[in-house]
Image (cartoon, rainbow, N blue to C red):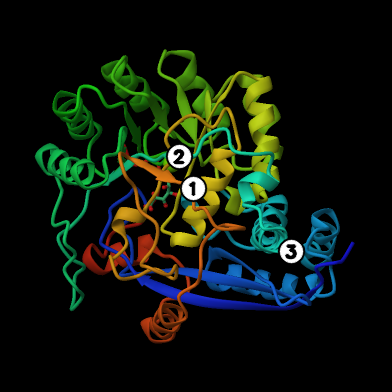
Amino acid sequence: MTDLKIVAVDITPVALKDPPLLNSSGVHEPYALRSIIEVHTDAGIVGVNEAYGDDATLALLHQSADAVIGADAFDLNGIGRRVATAVGGAEASSPTELIGAASHDKTVAQAFAAFEVACFDAQGKATGRRVVDLLGGAVRERVDFSAYLFYKWAEHPGDFDVDPWGEALDPDGIVDQARRMVDKYGFGSLKLKGGVFAPEEEIEAVKALRRAFPDRPVRLDPNANWTVETSHRVAAALEGELEYLEDPTPGIPGMAEVAAKTDLPLATNMCVTSFADIPESIRLDAVQVILSDHHFWGGLRATQNLAALCDTFGLGLSMHSNTHLGVSLAAMAHIAASTPNLTYALDTHTPWKAQDEDVVLGGGLTFTDGALTLPRGPGLGVELDRDAIARLHEQYLTCGIRRRDDVGWMRRVRPEWTGKRPRF
Ligand SMILES: O=C([O-])[C@@H](O)[C@@H](O)[C@H](O)[C@@H](O)C(=O)[O-]
Ligand SMILES: [Mg+2]
């Protein structure tokens, strides 16, 4: 038996153009930051992965990279110990407040995940097997994703490119956006990012979506921008209309108060974002669906552990997404394809990415009938496009953005903006 010894690690930050998507914090900046991780082995095999690309994440990844050199890419437990030691007592700031507060556990989980997925890719390339096979085998070959709808401006203030999606600031705009996304990708379910306008307007948008797409389940996610009282009111108005209501209000106790008075399942990627959050959430029956995310839950095996807990406690499992490239999309597809109870369509920001901006050869993976067919090749099944990485890295060097700051960008337009939640 031969080792697959890690001999070097490359971490390349990249910036991709991002449209002016609105959320409860503010507005997306004109560029979103990601990083590409390449784990080189003594066999000449290179495992790849994608992570957040803000300064805090990059520092964390560099700190951990030195520690994984010399490890066997098959020894994920050993790599986990090395990363935990390298991270020490550090607590990196969260790449965005929209995925909950930072914690030491999440910091270690985020650092480990970046290398774990790259090692799975290397293992797959070494054995000629797909990551899904290494995770226990595919329970599905096609993974459903949902249309991720955003209120948005037509363009970023200033001299930035106009994106092809145009403005969406009312129910008609949201329905038009949904129609274009469904026509183009065939998505079978719809998620509206709310918490932007008064709840009554967002209720109208959901109802308009339900009228326009009666067969498609709809989710609403105001990112904890409502008080408990407002959440009760909106939940009552949308009872029976939503597949789930995501993070109406901040915190596990608040979510529990909302859950106590509605039959709508409550989902979260804000208040239950690590294993440490699960006991209280179960005790208070605060959420009924957890949105997993391998980037901060600790990788692919940790996501399977989360899936087992959800199964045990009768919770649903879905999957969260921030702005990302094709490597993350492939990793999401592999974990979802290997997880029997990951049955909700996954979130993805893929449609918001400029068409020519991906680091995966061929411009990235895409959807047919709302689903992604698992790539066939070994590992994650994606090949990096060197020219694209160089271009997006150059964009990173010149864009001037080093951390995500939706609040700050909104302030350029509305100087009084604080992004403080809950606002309604
Ligand atoms: O991209 C956004 O604006 C989303 O709000 C994202 O940052 C959230 O983390 C996420 O998609 C969510 O479901 O809360
Ligand atoms: Mg959410």
Could you say which is closer to the camera, residue 390 or residue 159? 390
Specify the amino acid type for callout 1: Leu
Q: Is mark 2 within 8 Å of ligand 1?
A: no
Residue 325 lies in quadrant? bottom left
Residue denoted by label 1: 374
Disc 1 element: loop
Alpha carbon of mark 2 to alpha carbon of mark 3: how far? Answer: 36 Å
Q: Which mark lies nearer to you, 2 or 1?
A: 1
Pick whichever of labels 2 and 3 is earlier in the sequence. 3
Q: Quadrant of the N terminus?
A: bottom right
Mark pair 3, 1: CA separation: 36 Å
Question: Can residue 89 be seen by looking at this rendering?
Answer: yes
Front position in the image: 121 or 279: 121
Q: Is residue 29 above or below residue 221?
A: below
- Of residues 144 and 15, which is closer to you in this image? 144
Query: On the picture, is 10 further left or further right than 263?
Result: right
Mark closest to the chain's N terminus, 3 or 1? 3
Check disc 3: other Cα within 10 Å, few if <14, some if 14-19, many if 20+.
some
Inter-mark Cα distance, 2 to 1: 7 Å
Residue designated by label 3: 90
Disc 3 + disc 1, Cβ < 8 Å: no
Q: Looking at the rendering, which quadrant does residue 237 occupy?
A: top left
Q: Position of residue 264 (x, y in %)?
A: 40, 18
Q: Residue type at mark 2: give it.
A: Val
3 or 1: mark nearer the eye = 1
Residue 310 spot, x, y in % from top left: 63, 26
Locate residue 145 relative to residue 297 in the image: left or right. Answer: left
Q: Amino acid at mark 3?
A: Ala
